[in-house]
Amino acid sequence: MKFITKDRVSLDYTDQGTGQPVVILTGLGGVKEIWRQQISALLAAGYRVVNLDCRNQGQSEHTAKGLRISRHAQDLAELIAALKLEQVILVGNSMGAATIFAYVSLYGTQNIAKIIDVDQSPQMINTVEWPYGFKQLAWDNFYTYLQLPMGRSTFKHIDDETYKQIRPIQQAYPYDAELNLPFLVDHAMQNWRDVIADLQCPILFVAGGESPYFDPKFASTAAALAPFGQAKVIADSGHIVMAEQSAAFNQALLTFLAQ
C-alpha cells in the first residue's frame, strides 16, 4: 500500500489483521520485510499489524526531502492519523526506535499503549555520563566516523526464509547511504534520555547480547530511566535481534504485550 505524506513523499506500508494496532519501524538501511516472523506471530495473537518502510528505505520513495528524524516522526504521526489508529503499540529496531522517541517528544503518549525499542541506545554519542552509544562514536570524531562503513550488524545469520524475502527487495531498491547521510547525522546527534524519563506508557528495551553496535547494558540503564521501563537481553544475537533469534524475541515481545 502507498501513503502520501503532507510533503508529498510516497511511503510503502502493509496493513494486516484486526484488533489493537502494532506499528513496526525498521532500522537504517533496512526493509520492512525483515519482520516476517514477528508479523505472523502478532497476527496469530490477534493484533493488527502496520509495517512501514520509512522514506529513503525499501519500497518507499527515495528523496532529498525531510532528512531529519523529526520528519520521520511526522510521517509516523500522519500515517497513524490517516489510518485512525488508537492505543497504538510502537515497535522499532535501531533508527526505527529513535523515530518513536522523536514521535513521543513531539506528540506525547496519549495515543500510545506500549513501546518496544530493539537495540537502539537513546543516545548515539558516547560521553563520560553515557558510555552506551554507537560503537566508538564521540563528539571529536562525529562526522568522520559516520561516513565510515558501519560494519556487520548481525552476530548470527538471519533465517533462510526471511533472507529469501528481503534480498530481492534490497537489490531492487538499494539503500543510498550518500543521499541519506544528512539524516544519519541528524539522527546520531539526538539524546532521547529526557524523553524516556518522561514516558507515560510502558517501554521494553530489547538488546542483542552480542550487538556489534551497542553495549547491551544500555537496555537496563535506559529502562531504569523510564517510569514503566523493562529490559531484556537476547543471547546470541546482534543488532537485528528479531531476525537472528526470532523465537526468543517473539516470546519476549508477546509476553510484554500481554502484561
Image (cartoon, rainbow, N blue to C red):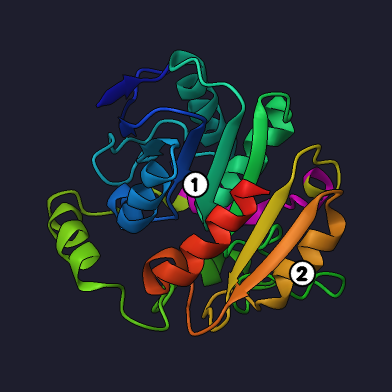
Viewer-closest of 153 and 203: 203
Label 2: which residue? 220
**Residue 197: % across, % down:** 85, 48
**Residue 212: % across, % down:** 51, 80
- Residue at the spot x=62%, y=74% of the render? 233
Residue type indicated by callout 2: Ser
- Residue at the spot x=54%, y=39% of the render? 68
Q: Is residue 53 left or right of residue 143?
A: left
Residue 157 magenta:
no
Q: Where does the magenta region start and end? A: 182-195
In this picture, is 239 found above or below 7? below
Q: Pick the quarter of the image with the N terminus.
A: top left
- Please indicate, yes or no, whether residue 220 appears anywhere in the rendered image: yes
Q: Is residue 100 left or right of residue 190?
A: left
Give the mark nearest the N terminus, 1 or 2: 1
Helix, strand, or loop for circle 1?
helix
Label 1: which residue? 183
Q: Is residue 176 left or right of residue 182?
A: left
